Image (spheres, rainbow, N blue to C red):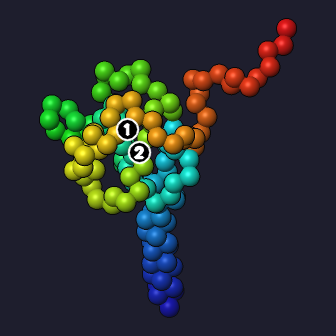
């Protein structure tokens, strides 16, 4: 009888751990970056027109065209090292659920050229590189 209780307890613990491991909120699999636009849920990709790349929220990686091949990278290519993700405009790909957002790159490149600015966007977090212009300077 003790053996059955022990096996049952172990199974409950294993199943509980497996369910917790699959919970995206627990693993932050779908937590957008602080520089992402506020107000969107159930989104996987942003298109970044200024750098002609994508950001995969689930993988927490950029999807960049490097020498004709779309690759996942932890950071943008070196030519964009000074690019401010907080200031850059993000196109939220609300209707796309696949694994290859670049499938529509040629259309997006025309519709959202480098320098594109649509409606004002607020980011999820504060830009750590930007001083608060509302602060009063006291002598």
Provide residue 103's location: percent of width, then percent of height: 22, 50
Q: For the view shown, which residue lies furthest in the bottom direction?
A: 1
Relative horizontal placement of residue 104, taking residue 59 as reference (left or right): left
95 displayed left or right of 23:
left
Which quadrant would the C terminus be assigned to in this image?
top right
- Residue 100 horizontal/vertical position (percent): 24, 52
Q: Residue at x 27, y 55 (%)?
A: 99
Tell me: 92 left or right of 108.
Answer: right
66 on left or right of 57: left
Residue 134 visible in the snapshot: yes
Residue 78 in the image: state x and y as whole percent. Answer: 31, 22
Q: Secondary structure at mark 1?
A: strand
Per the image, the residue denoted by label 1 is 48
Near-viewer residue (75 or 49): 49
For marks 1 and 2 on the same chain, the one whose residue lies earlier in the sequence? 1
Residue at 31% over, 37% down: 53
In this figure, which residue is indicated by the disc labeled 2?
91
Q: Secondary structure at mark 2?
A: strand
Q: Is residue 52 above or below residue 31?
A: above
Residue 122 placement: quadrant: top right
Asked whether residue 61 is in view, the answer is: no
**Dot 2 crowding, Cα within 10 Å, few <14, some 14–19, many 20+:** many
Q: Residue furthest toward the right?
A: 139
| Whether label 1 touches label 2, CB < 8 Å | yes
């Amino acid at each position: 009888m003790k053996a059955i209780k022990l096996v049952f307890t172990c199974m409950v613990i294993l199943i509980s751990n497996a369910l917790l491991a699959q919970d995206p909120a627990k693993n932050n699999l779908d937590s957008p970056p602080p520089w992402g636009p506020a107000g969107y849920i159930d989104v996987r990709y942003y298109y970044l027109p200024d750098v002609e790349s994508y950001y995969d929220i689930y993988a927490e990686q950029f999807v960049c065209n490097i020498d004709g091949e779309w690759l996942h990278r932890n950071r943008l290519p070196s030519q964009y090292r000074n690019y401010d993700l907080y200031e850059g405009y993000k196109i939220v790909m609300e209707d796309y659920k696949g694994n290859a957002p670049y499938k529509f790159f040629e259309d997006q490149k025309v519709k959202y050229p480098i320098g594109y600015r649509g409606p004002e966007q607020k980011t999820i977090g504060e830009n750590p590189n930007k001083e608060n212009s509302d602060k009063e300077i006291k002598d």
